[in-house]
Amino acid sequence: MSEQKSNNRGTGKDYWRSLDQLAQSERYKEFLQREFPEGASEHSNAWSRRNFLGIMGASLALAGLTGCRQPEEKIVPYVRPPEEVIPGIPQQYATAMPFGLDALGLVVESHVGRPTKIEGNAHHPSTLGAASVFMQAELLTMYDPDRSKLVLNNGRESTWDSFVAYWRERADIHKADRGKGLAVLTSPFASPTLFRLKNEFLRAYRDATWVSWEPISEEPVVEGMRLLTGEPLMPVYRLEKAEVIAAFDCDFVFSEPGSIVNARRFMDGRRVAVDFDPMNRLYVAEAAFTPTGAVADHRLALQAGRIPALLLGLAEALLNLGADPGVFQRQRPPQLTEHERAWCLELAKDLLIRRGKSVVMAGRKQPAHVHAIAMAINAALGGVGQTVSLKLLTDASLPDTQAFASLINDMKGGRVQTLITIGLNPAYNTPGSLDFGGGLERVEHRIHMGLYADETAAKSTWHLPQAHFLESWSDARAADGTITFMQPLIAPLYGGHSDVELYSLLVTGRDRAGYDIVRETWQDRFPRGLFESKWQQTLHDGLVEGSATPDENADLGALRLVRYLEQHPVSAPAADEIELVLTPSMATYDGRYANNGWLQECPDPVTKLAWDNAACLSPAMARRLGVKNEDVVSLRIGGKSVDMPVWIVPGQADHTVVTSLGYGRTAAGRVGNGVGFDTYPLRSHLEPYVRRGVTLAPAGGSYPLANTQDHGSMEGRPLVREMAVGDYRKHPGAIAEMEEHPPLKSLWEEHSYDTGYQWGMSIDLNACIGCNACTIACQAENNIPLVGKEQTRKGREMHWIRVDRYFNGDVDQPEMVHQPVPCQHCENAPCEQVCPVAATVHDKEGLNLMVYNRCIGTRYCSNNCPYKVRRFNFFNYTRDYAETIKMAQNPDVTVRSRGVMEKCTYCLQRINEARQVAKKDGNREIRDGEILTACQQACPTRAIVFGNINDPDSEVSTARARNRTYYLLGYLNVKPRTSYMAKLRNPMESMLNVEKTYGKQGGDR
Amino acid sequence: MSREAKVTSQPVHEVLIPGDPSFHDITHQVSAIVEGKTPKAWYVLFTISAIVASSLVFQIGYLIWEGIGIWGLNIPVAWGWAIVNFVFWVGIGHAGTLISAILFMLRQRWRTSINRFAEAMTIFAVICALLFPAIHVGRIWVVYWMAPVPNQMAMWPNFRSPLLWDFFAVGTYFTASLMFWYVGLIPDLATIRDRAASKLKKIFYGIFSLGWRGGNRQWRHYELAYLVLAGVSTPLVLSVHSIVSTDFATSVVPGWHTTIFPPYFVAGAIFSGFAMVLTLAIIARKVYGLENLITMKHLERINLIILVTGMMVGYAYSMEFFIAWYSGNIYEQFAFVNRAFGPYAWAYWIMVSCNVLVPQVFWFKKYRRHIVVMFIASILINVGMWFERFVIVITLASDYLPSSWDYYSPTVWDVGLLIGSFGLFFTLFLLFLRFLPMVAMSEVKGVLPQADPHHGGTHRG
């Protein structure tokens, strides 16, 4: 531990230390010639910036590479400017981001050939115009100066052409014996072009092995559907039609596949614009506290290992109520506690009352048969075809852990001569139960393609830099089957090649451009004669309208499932058996985003930890172990052990350790190396997410964690206001009355702000899921710098909109609420009065402006801000930006230097852009909804509304007029322009009684 | 006028300077310190102070180079030790002008023995204080934008900001104090000029004594000027810390937003200023053998003022709690409960013990006249008053939204600047002791019985 600790403490320091070590090696000299060093997007320790000359040299080297990029392959100055490119006016291109078996439709903003902002594509069924943190942060990944830039052959610089020559040689050898000993390992995909190439490959090399696998995938879902129906199907939920939703260990609003759409559709069912609008009801049973658990109306915390039993308990309750899911024959459900039985019964009643309008969802942390049971229940509830539909996965290479395990076995047995790994990093993220590294050693020809020269690249004979999806031509299918196109926004920044190009090379031995390969796929698929127009239309839209796969009328007879359950009876773990739950990280996902500073610094929605993962424990468990936050504990399971710090999460299931995967990378890059703790060794490929029988012991010592919110209680203050929807309907005025204050009168006559545009924002806390999409959108839009772990720990993070998380109720079974807090743009702004140099002032449209070049940095405004939304540049956080990171900055927003205060501007640049458009457009008024702030645009649940409050018909005026509206700290009479709408919950009376009797923690107590 | 006569007549009866020294004795005793050989102890102390003070150059250089991020500040605690030190030093700077101006106006003639170095202390403390607002801003190179300098960019400071009031209040106070001190020095500088043995000294003191010859007309002008300056300085003594307190009192921060701040700050400033005068007086009278000029009577009166102002401060502490409770404002209530029992309770209780409990020893005459006791008490009060400002500033750590609460810890640079400012203070003070008359000779002579040969029958020729 001590060694690990010293490596991890102070990411900044470390990163320099390793450069120093590099300085002595041959490799570093090579680096100097070819790298653009420095400028990790993170602020490093002030003492250690010894790299000034390096940057200067590198910047010169880079000057030749940073030309403006259009689809042409050559870099030429704009002798003849490309059509449609007007400097200063950004363009929008539709493309998509492949993510597991889904494709997330994007619209990317491009300034003179530089992509600067990723948004969702409003027409795309997977994003509906919203954008998750991962989608948005991909921009930074694309520009990451640590991305792989060179073809490496045994660690030496080589070229793509040499690889092509090498592969032709290998191809001839493999063709001779029909691909025996040739294996391809890729991440799973659903892509017509890749699927075509995969099939061609397998035709060319009949005996070759093709394995798709990913550490975190939809495999349990797809396999569950196969178990139930015999077909690899994908459930697509239609939560807008659901009145009662039960989520079993399923964080469907946040970390599960399809979360953006699911969150939007779910929230559409509970907006309660006027008092008597209907509101759906959500039941959640889960181990970790998730954003879905936070918005639940009833949440049962119990060990993830008990979820299968609980779901069977629900099936039994439904059976008893006359709706037989058909999952039992002789087998009876396992023993549940009285509490759990009562919970299942009440849930079953509620689901049944709304037959056809209810849905049960299972999360991918649960094994396949749980998904099968859940879908069988949906069938019994009449939900299939209504609230959930099943889609046949087409053009998909499905994740297959079994195949992956046997591939490793073959590798170990020396039966693989050539292994081609594409877009995966198995040397890092293979479960501890499989020895990928050991197998790899026995493979003679190890070819790796990836965005980074990562852990796997280091062990490979060939490493090929991969082009980012924003740099490549490709296609994909969204979760519902919609055909989606990907087009490059920029030529490969670091000279990489796309997976499409590599696949094609592997099949044909020819080195072709991705553009031609993708067109070839569609030459056959689009109607003849209409190809060009269809191609152009698809590129423009990003998708083929109406190409979703039709619903599958699968046989949901459940017989296969019944047989399976007979053979594999479901058991519930003993109560005192501690289980380990491994979750994807909200920052690094499976480790792939480890070098992405935006994500690393984005606090987890629940723990509010940044820059690390931790072993999360319930308060009761921490008490029993005698540990507190930041104490190091040793987790031991299956002969592997990991030491990591503790973080106590109120509301987490007892006897459960929750921790995330994707940390502790050693070859991620300068930002991600040594951040957090690698938990893959604790993983088993047989039980990838939930393992029983982990032992936990204090290891002594402590490890500092960077937490952005120290205090989780509202201290009885009316900050996030919440009501049960029933009470709210009875007393709609109660929300405003939650704060008592004298009449708000001013000593002087105040500015009336009653003419022209008056900007305001309304945030619906009932819709907020705390997902941080707004935070990252704001960071990307407004060039917000990163500060690193040390600075975050000090409380100097720079986010202009933060999401506050509060717990209320009993510490062991609390409720959680989220509240996004941007600048409130107070009309009576306390910050303005105290600034000695008038650097923060009001404009006539009611905006609280920050004049950066007037600011001298007294920080008095921040002290006097009741909301503490102002952020200060304690250091010059942007000084060491690499040239490529500079390219990612929004040219419409000032990059701030040291010593000035900054804060949310309500996206002033977007307001002014709309103003210019309106002015040119016949001097018309700006239309309502014409301006979207970055946070509003990204929000998956449309919790944020922005517009002119002086227009009584605008959406924001309507929102402000609702009786759920209140003003945060309104009693101060600062007159905030940002208003909030109170949160509502929709509990069921009889379930409240169950909770009253038994509490909200399941399992044997 | 008769009232004034009554007031003035009283102290004449009191023997302020024992031992019945002659005018010459006083001149000789005080001037000898300036004229004689420099004591070894002075060199030792000066070297230490000067080294510490010059570390400030490096510290501030690094601060400007890297940014104020080297301090422990964060959001929400955007002000830290720099502002604590500023208020602390301004507070110290109160005693000098209070002694010179207000006690002068009140005809407290005992002040003459201590006013000179108390005033010097004021000047140096205010210099130390002014250091901090200048360097605590994020962009030091444009700090002059706080000043209303007409410019082509049409930029003008915001006169609604208390920081700007501060700028003027402290600036005015410094200017007035400096002038007051200098005017008071003129006759004594002339004395030293006249006694000077070397040409260089004659020229040096000659320049600064502005041609003083001690003529009747000069004395008349001089005394009038002194009176006018005392009149100007008197309101400044009260205004400067009142205005400094508005930095806090006009804000919306719970625990800062209180109307008691101006009087409470003034009382606290006098309290801490006198404690510092006491510390310095005890050392100086011992080292330079001035026990006959700065007598136990002087020290006892200082202690009485400390006792009174200490209780005023204690009253303010309790009244803040009462009003917080009485207001019914949950944010206000929390701020005060949190002060006493929250994460910074240790600082709060240091403050209460040092500022409220320690001065209580001065109820006893024995301790009021006990050098060791009063020396320890004066040090503790200085510590306590520093912590008072710390407790106030750190209220920022837990304001309205619990989500933004955070703990503030200083870094080595925060501590370094405080130590450095003490180095600067003592360097300036030691230079003053060495080169300027530390007791106002002409004024002390004025309270000797000989100065008033025709009054009250105490004439002794």
Image (cartoon, helix red, strand yellow):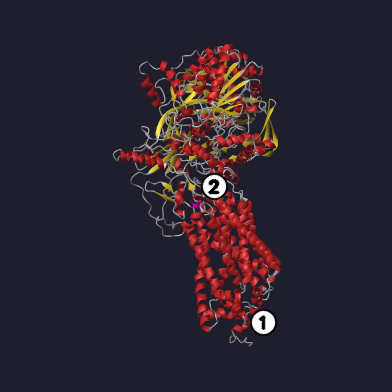
Q: Nearer the viewer, mark 2 or mark 1?
A: 2
Label 2 – label 1 distance at C-alpha: 64 Å
Q: Where is residue A938 in the image (x, y as percent from the top left)?
A: 45, 34
Determine the residue positioned at 69% across, 36% down: A3
Q: Is residue A718 above or below residue B364?
A: above
Give the magenta-colored segment's residue range: A856-860
The residue that disc 1 covers is: B20
Q: In this view, does A316 lie above or below B236?
A: above
The residue that disc 2 covers is: A875
Determine the residue positioned at 40% across, 22% down: A544
Q: In this view, does A856 lie above or below A305?
A: below
Q: Where is residue A485 in the image (x, y as percent from the top left)?
A: 44, 24
Left/right of residue A643 with respect to residue A207 in the rendered view:
right
| Camera-nearest residue between B352 and A681 | A681
The answer to which quarter of the image holds residue A957 is: top left
Left/right of residue B207 with respect to residue B294 in the rendered view:
left
Q: Specify the subunit that label 1 lies on.
A: B
Give, as a three-letter code, the residue at label 2: Phe
Q: Do labels 2 and 1 share a chain?
A: no
How many residues crowd around disc 2 within 10 Å: few (fewer than 14), some, or many (20 or more)? many
Q: Residue A595 carries which label?
A: none
- Secondary structure under the numbered disc 1 in the rendered image: loop
Q: Magenta stretch: dominant SS? A: loop
Give, as a three-letter code, the residue at label 1: Asp
